[in-house]
Image (cartoon, grey):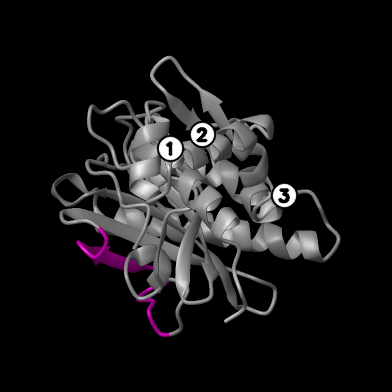
Amino acid sequence: MAEQSKTVDAALRLLARLAESNGDASATSLARALGISRTAAARLLATLEVHGLARRTDAGWGPGLGLLALAAGVEPLLRGLARAELEQLAARFRETAVLTVRECDDAVAVDHVVGGTRVVQIHYPTGTRHPLTAGASGRALLPGSLEDGVVFTTGELEPGVTGVAAPILDAAGRPVASLGLVAPEHRFPDRAEVAAAVRAAASRVSANLARHHAGQHRPAPPEAAPPPGSGPPPAGRPPRARGGGADAALPTGR
């Protein structure tokens, strides 16, 4: 393994701690968590602040807004093509919709939208990482995992949480990402409806991705979602799912 920089490693681990905080992390607590001196932690915080990656708050330290600019550069094409579908799924189901890509043997969330205003919801923030073999979003990227175009899992990432995901395919039919929805098992919507909605959304993103690569940059718009409480969609359109909410925060690590 190539030699690593201990300073850079400490700075990145500090950033990860800040991302998990509520803006109330102190230099002392960060130093203790990282196993470094308070002086070293304070020096790292000051450097990250200069670059907009950390910011002072009334309660301590939190992640800087500069991280948003960095995150925006991750899979910008896929994020742009999938964003409207994520928003529509989240609003339709009142749950959390997630866009995931593969990185080696891991599935990594690159965008998400939390729908509804429930007191308890699932959070699946950008950077959430887990093995490809765990969770619907990861399994949807593996060959042979699909049943009728989607994957369902329950409790593989968080007890009591169910997920469904469908692959986003490139022009050659290879999965390059997955589009999914996660919700508490006890209020998960009708599986047939949610499967059809997620599958159709992923199919539209796949089609728009193919158009882009073919030089046609005008994406097809997502279907208009029926208002809450309305009946099933008219014949000829894929059914769109309604759904529950999200209760527990998914872990940001493995």
Q: Is residue 152 left or right of residue 45?
A: left
Work out whether 163 lies above or below 16: below
The residue under the point 34% across, 46% down is 33
Query: Label 3 crowding class (10 Å Cα cut-off): few <14, some 14-19, many 20+?
Result: some
Q: Position of residue 81 (x, y in %)?
A: 65, 50
- Picture quarter containing residue 246? top left
Most common secondary structure along the magenta stretch? loop
Question: Which quadrant of the structure image shows residue 120?
Answer: top left
Which region shows up in magenta?
Answer: 144-157
Instruction: Point out which mark residue 38 bears.
Output: 1
Q: Quadrant of the C terminus?
A: bottom left
CB atoms of marks 2 and 1 within 8 Å = yes
Residue at the location (53% across, 69% down)?
102
Q: Which mark's residue is nearer the viewer, 1 or 3? A: 1
Q: What residue sits right under mark 2 in the picture?
A: 42
Which residue type carries mark 2? Ala
Q: Amino acid at mark 3?
A: Pro
User: As drawn, is 49 to the left or to the right of 139?
Assistant: right
Residue 112, position in %: x, y?
47, 45
Q: Amino acid at mark 1?
A: Arg
Magenta span contains residue 14: no
Q: State the quadrant of the N terminus.
A: bottom right
Disc 2 crowd rating (10 Å Cα; few below 14, some 14-19, many 20+) is some
| Among numbered discs 1 and 3, the one appearing first in the sequence | 1
User: Does the segment drawn in magenta span residue 147?
Assistant: yes
Where does residue 173 sit, x and y in percent of width and height?
62, 78
Q: Which mark is residue 219?
A: 3
